Amino acid sequence: MVAHFSEELFVGRGLRPGGDHLPQITEKAMVGGVAMLVAQRLERGTHAELPALAPEAIQFVLTPYLGSEEAKTVAARHG
């Protein structure tokens, strides 16, 4: 799962000048972080919290590719 979604995020490197200079681990770190958030909520039985986490998770994942402000704007529209 991590490998699949990491590959999907990799195309984001072309959205920002210098995106090709991001650390190689960027995509796996983003996907792994979100997967950990989901797994923790499922394990604790607090999965109802997940929708509220969506805006921050979206911003977290998009920031390396879009920059902080644009990622925040996108997250606000989808959260």
Image: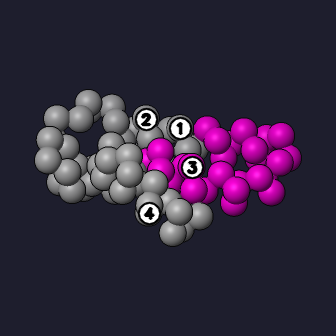
Q: At x 30% / y 52%, what residue is drawn?
A: 66
Q: Along the polypeptide, which appears first: circle 1 or circle 3?
A: 1
> In the displayed structure, does residue 41 sit left or right of residue 75?
right
Question: As rendered, which of 9 and 60 lies closer to the eye?
Answer: 60
Mark 3–mark 2 Cα distance, whole angstroms, equals 15 Å
- Select label 4 or label 2 by which is in front: 4
Q: At x 50% / y 38%, what residue is drawn?
A: 32
Kindly identify the amino acid type of the residue bearing the numbered disc 1. Answer: Gly
The residue that mark 3 highlights is 56
Q: Residues within 10 Å of mark 4 (few under 14, many from 20)?
A: some
| Label of residue 74 in the image | 4
Do residues under tags 1 and 3 come within 8 Å of each other at their CB atoms? no
- Select label 3 or label 2 by which is in front: 3
Q: Position of residue 72 (x, y in %)?
A: 45, 54
The C terminus lies in which quarter of the figure? Answer: bottom right
Mark 4–mark 2 Cα distance, whole angstroms, equals 20 Å
Kindly identify the amino acid type of the residue bearing the numbered disc 2. Answer: Ala
The residue that mark 2 highlights is 29
Kindly identify the amino acid type of the residue bearing the numbered disc 4. Answer: Val
Q: Is residue 58 visible?
A: yes
Mark 1–mark 4 Cα distance, whole angstroms, equals 19 Å
User: Residues in magenta?
Assistant: 36-61
Mark 1–mark 3 Cα distance, whole angstroms, equals 12 Å
> In the displayed structure, does residue 3 sit left or right of residue 59?
left
Mark 4–mark 3 Cα distance, whole angstroms, equals 11 Å
Q: At x 55% / y 49%, what residue is drawn?
A: 57
The residue that mark 1 highlights is 33
